[in-house]
Image (cartoon, rainbow, N blue to C red):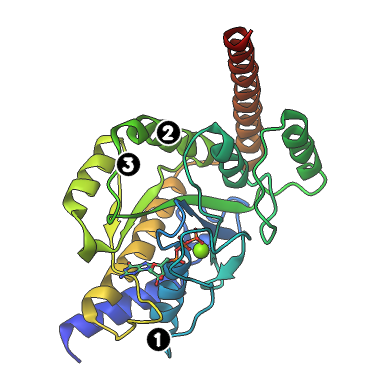
Amino acid sequence: MAGYQRTVDHVRDYIQHFSLDNCALGSQGYNRVLLQLFGYMGHGKSSLINSCKYVLDDGEYYIYANALASHTSVTFNRTAYPLTDTITIVDNRGCSTFNAYETGEIYAQLGNFIPVNQRVEWTNNYEQMTDRLEDSEMDPNFTDVTIPVFVYSVKKGLAEGEKKETKEFIDNCRKMTGFYPIVVLTHKTCGDFLQAEKEFLLMGVEKVIKIENYTKEDHGRTQGRHKEILNFLYSVLEDVNFQMKYKKNPRKERVQRKKFLLNFLHEREVNQRLEKMQMQNITN
Ligand SMILES: Nc1nc2c(ncn2[C@@H]2O[C@H](COP(=O)(O)OP(=O)(O)OP(=O)(O)O)[C@@H](O)[C@H]2O)c(=O)[nH]1
Ligand SMILES: [Mg+2]
């Protein structure tokens, strides 16, 4: 067997058999690695899921998550797709911006305060959001190790104004999960991926993976693409292994994250009211 193929098969095998029980201090009460995707509309989140399934299953290309060229959102539900016994990848509704309106929902998802397999609705309504947080206490989830994954197409460069809100968002993702988001740059042959990589690294992101997704139109296997997708999953597990070397207290973490989220929602509410008052003053 060629050396390259041996490596691909070896990494695939490692990913398929990864178990939290084998981490340095055991599973510490966690039982699932949840890769939570998010990103702008049409940047390749659903295609990334199909690519991961294709590479891991090593069979025919199959469309699990609906992916389409479209000017509007294709995905509206937060559907979970199991990749292995331990790893599950979760699709998401694409955002149009990363302002507080849409990010509030993502923080709640990342903190495991919203169950998967539900339609994603955005709301600015403070009471509605806090109600949902309270509802999550009925069946609290502290068994997922959640890794944020920011899918970003290099076809579109980040505008200056977007960088500040994206940086803040990246920092908050870390507060909600303990992990810096892994950035997956898609459409890598359609833009300047080196520039995009640099911008994300400057924002504090630690891992930027460059890929070309397999798609309905083009899914002829290549070594390079297979390797990129496996590299993405392997990098995630490397991060998990690192964090799991340290003592965790899932319940305590959940409480801290809830406090952060409540604070964020409260500030958002206060800012909205201020803006409203300022608008009224201008129009009066
Ligand atoms: N060439 C190329 N096309 C891609 C790549 N990733 C996605 N596409 C195509 O881009 C279009 C949008 O991809 P989706 O996977 O549906 O994007 P999405 O982020 O799930 O979109 P929403 O669900 O609407 O937010 C589809 O036509 C895909 O085939 C890529 O890496 N390279
Ligand atoms: Mg989608």
Few, some or many residues within 10 Å of mark 2 (<14, 14–19, 20+)? some
The one nearer the camera, 237 or 270, is: 270
Residue at (18%, 47%) from the top-left corner? 195
Residue to which mark 3 is pinned: 205
In screen coordinates, is 156 left or right of 129?
A: left
Where is residue 70 drawn, in percent x and y? 46, 65
Residue to which mark 2 is pinned: 171
Residue at (67%, 48%) from the top-left corner? 121
The one nearer the camera, 166 or 260, is: 166
Where is residue 243 drawn, in percent x and y? 44, 46
The quarter of the image holding the C terminus is top right
Callout 3 amino acid: Val
Say which element carries label 3: loop
Q: Quadrant of residue 229?
A: bottom left
The quarter of the image holding the N terminus is bottom left
In screen coordinates, is 82 left or right of 116?
A: left
Residue to which mark 1 is pinned: 58
